[in-house]
Image (cartoon, rainbow, N blue to C red):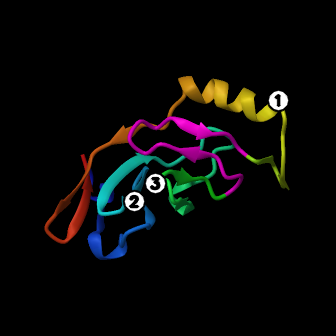
Amino acid sequence: MSENDRIPASQLPSGAVRRAGNWAVGNRDGEYFAVSRRCRHQLADVSKGSIDADGCLVCPWHGARYDVRTGEMVAGPRGFLGYHGPTPGYTQFVRGYAKVLRLRVRRALRRGDDVVVE
């Protein structure tokens, strides 16, 4: 663990996602999580994403959704490059290889005033 793998807890209110080194760290209804930062679709920085009503991490570029407990893509992207919309066939293709290339998952714990990635 490096100094970069931590973030002040004050920067992670419920529903927030932020960057901590190579990790996207978030607060899912009081439960902290850490996953690798690059979306499996087009490598967007998911630390700039959001958490949806189901507690999934949503990619900021094309809306791919990830289960933060497993790193699995649970819904494929809705677009490609600058296009945002339906992509029949392509979305299933991305979800197929994303089953093998899941986001890496680490524990994120509150330690004093910080949230630390282990």
Q: Kindly report the distance in space between the C-alpha atoms of the residues bearing marks 3 and 1.
A: 26 Å
Residue 76, image x, y percentages: 67, 40
Residue at the image point whose x is 32% and y is 42% from the top: 106
Query: Can residue 73 be found in the magenta stretch?
Result: yes
**Residue at the disc numbered 2:** 26
Q: Kindly report the distance in space between the C-alpha atoms of the residues bearing marks 1 and 2.
A: 31 Å
* Structural crowding at the residue carrying mark 1, measured as other residues with C-alpha within 10 Å and reported as few (<14), some (14–19) or many (≥20): few
* Structural crowding at the residue carrying mark 3, measured as other residues with C-alpha within 10 Å and reported as few (<14), some (14–19) or many (≥20): some
Residue at the image point whose x is 44% and y is 67% from the top: 16
Residue at the image point whose x is 63% and y is 51% from the top: 44
Asked if 118 appears above or below 27 in the picture, the reply is above
Q: Nearer the viewer, mark 1 or mark 2?
A: 1
Compare residues 58 and 40 and report the one nearer the observer.
Answer: 58
**Residue at the disc numbered 3:** 55
Residue 85, image x, y percentages: 84, 51
- Which segment did they paint magenta? 61-77
Of the two numbered discs 3 and 1 on the same chain, state the one appearing first in sequence: 3
Q: Amino acid at mark 3?
A: Gly
Q: Residue pushed farthest front?
A: 54
* Structural crowding at the residue carrying mark 2, measured as other residues with C-alpha within 10 Å and reported as few (<14), some (14–19) or many (≥20): many
- In the displayed structure image, the side of residue 42 where residue 17 appears, left or right: left
- In the displayed structure image, the side of residue 68 where residue 50 appears, left or right: right
**Residue at the disc numbered 1:** 89
Residue at the image point whose x is 79% and y is 48% from the top: 79
- In the displayed structure image, the side of residue 78 where residue 38 appears, left or right: left
Q: Amino acid at mark 1?
A: Gly
